Image (spheres, rainbow, N blue to C red):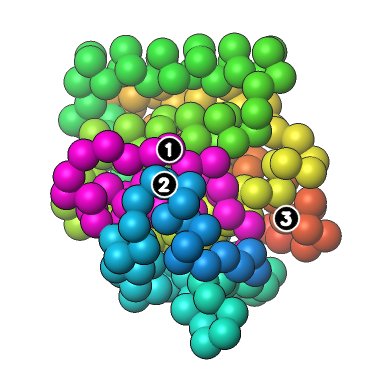
Amino acid sequence: MLQKLDSTPLHERVYQQLRRAIMAGLYSPGQSFNYGQVAKELGTSVMPVREALNRLAAERAVEILPKRGVVIPPMTPEKYNEIGRVRLKLEGMAGEMAAQAITDETLAALNTIVAEMLAMREQSRRWQDYVLMNYEFHFAVYRAGAPQILLPLIESLWLQSGPLLNVYKDVGIMENSHRHDNIVDALKSRDAARARKTIQIDLIAGFDYISRAHGWSMDFALDPL
């Protein structure tokens, strides 16, 4: 699941890799583990793992409980509904900002990611690989336009909702290459309103898919233009 680390600063690398794994859904809500398990998987000592997980606990990405170790917080439909609605606002705004600042280099990188995701689906690759690439796609967009204030807020919401992506291992991954193509087209056209809309359409499709998989009834909607 996680990749071994090979250089310093070790504590920061442990933190970043665990953070990315949580945002990408490699851990499920309610899942528990201990410091030793993570340290063994990463090929490191317990100390940097403990430091990283303490930082993640401060961000509400994990809970550290006596006698139970580390737990990914459970998710309720009410909490997911609230997170989803805020994400639509913030990530739509980030898309607008990206449309005004994106470079040709980033657009080329996004096209590469879309192609790789399509190939993964056709080859029936592991769901973990697919959701990690989905994470890379979205944050490549958001970093293009909103790196200072907005990006940390979006990351915080992904940390809280990311574990729900783990449902893909049971229900299968959702096809989204055409929606990602639409996002790239809007960004290439420097059309801020369309970039916001295409990102929100992609998010709503994902929110609805995950909600149904959990038996929840949600009603997410696009922002009015």
| Residue 13 on the magenta span | yes
Direction from residue 209 to residue 185 in the image, left or right: left
Q: Nearer the viewer, mark 3 or mark 2?
A: 2
**Along the line of sight, which residue is nearer the eye, 18 or 61?**
18
Q: Secondary structure under badge 1?
A: loop
Residue under label 2, please give it: 42
Of labels 3 and 2, earlier in sequence is 2
Residue under label 3, please give it: 211
Distance of mark 3 from mark 1, alpha carbons?
30 Å
Magenta segment, which residues? 1-29
The reply to whether callout 3 and callout 1 are in contact (CB within 8 Å) is no
Amino acid found under the numbered disc labelled 1? Gln
Of labels 2 and 1, earlier in sequence is 1
| Residue 26 on the magenta span | yes
Identify the residue shown where x is 53% and y is 76%.
Answer: 69
Question: Where residue 91 is drawn, which disc sits there?
Answer: none
Residue 55 sits above or below residue 101 on the image: below
**Along the line of sight, which residue is nearer the eye, 148 or 67?**
67
Amino acid found under the numbered disc labelled 2? Leu
Direction from residue 213 to residue 91 in the image, left or right: left
The quadrant of the rendering that contains the N terminus is top right
Residue sticking out furthest to the bottom: 66
The quadrant of the rendering that contains the C terminus is top left
**Along the line of sight, which residue is nearer the eye, 31 or 117?**
31
Distance of mark 2 from mark 1, alpha carbons?
6 Å
Answer few, some or many: residues within 10 Å of disc 3's Cα (few below 14, many 20 plus, some between 14 and 19): some
Residue under label 1, please give it: 3
